[in-house]
Amino acid sequence: RSLIGALLWIARCTRPDILFAIIYLSRFSNCATKIHWDALIRFVRYLKTTFKIPFVLKLSNDTSMDKAKITITTDVDWAHDIVNKKSFSGSRVITYGAMVNFITSKQPIVSTSSTEAEYISASNGCREGLY
C-alpha cells in the first residue's frame, strides 16, 4: 500500500503519463497478487529509467494575455473494467498553453455505447474546466 501511495503522489504531482495505470492498480491493494506486485515493480523500473526525460508543456505561439485561452481535452476507455463494464474517463485543462489540471476516474454508470461514454467524459471535462 505504501508503494501505491508513493506512486500515486508521483503520478499526481509530476508524472501524469502513469496516473491511469497506478489508479487502476490501486484497486487491487487489498487483494494484491504477484502479478500486481510485478506490475508495480515494472513502474518503479520505468520511473528509474525515465526520470531524466523532462515532461515539458510549451506555450503556443498564439498565446496572448488579452483573452483567456482555455483548452479542455477528454478521452474515454469504453467498458474497460471487466468486472462491471464501467468506462474510465480522463481529461486535462490547459490555460495559456500550460496544463493546470488533469484527472482520470471511473465513470459512475455503465455506458451502453462508446458515444454515451464520450459524452459523460466531455461533461466531466467541462466540469473540471469550470472549476
Image (cartoon, grey):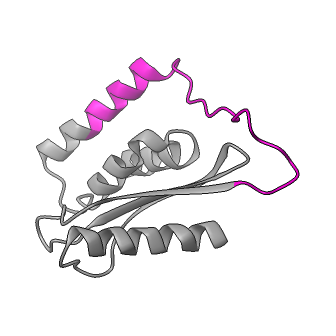
Rendered position, 4 above or below 29: above
- On whether residue 22 falls in the magenta region, the answer is no
Percent across and percent down for residue 60 are 69, 35
Residue 17, how many percent across, how many down?
Answer: 43, 40
Residue extending farthest to the bottom is 109
Residue 7 vertical position relative to residue 124 in the rendered view, above or below: above
Q: Is residue 4 left or right of residue 69?
A: left
Q: Range of the magenta residues?
A: 40-69
For the C terminus, the quadrant is: bottom right
Pick whichever, 3 or 64, lies toward us. Answer: 64
**Residue 65: image location, x then y, percent:** 86, 48
Q: Is residue 131 visible?
A: no
Number of numbered markers: 0
Q: Quadrant of residue 64?
A: top right
Residue depicted at x 62% and y 66%: 129
Residue 124, percent across and down? 47, 72
Quarter where residue 127 is shown: bottom right
Dominant secondary structure (helix, strand or loop) of the stretch shown in magenta: loop
Q: Residue at x 15, y 74 (%)?
A: 84
Asked whether residue 123 appears in the rendered view, the answer is: yes
For the residue pair 130 and 108, the one nearer the viewer reads as 130
What residue is shown at x 27% (from left), y 62% (from top)? Answer: 27
Q: Is residue 41 magenta?
A: yes
Residue shown at 19% from the left, 46% from the top: 36
Front residue (pair 24, 41): 24
Give left or right: position of 109 versus 128.
left
Task: Give the residue at the far right of this rendering.
Answer: 66
| Left or right: where 63 falls relative to 57 | right
Q: Is residue 126 left or right of residue 40?
A: right
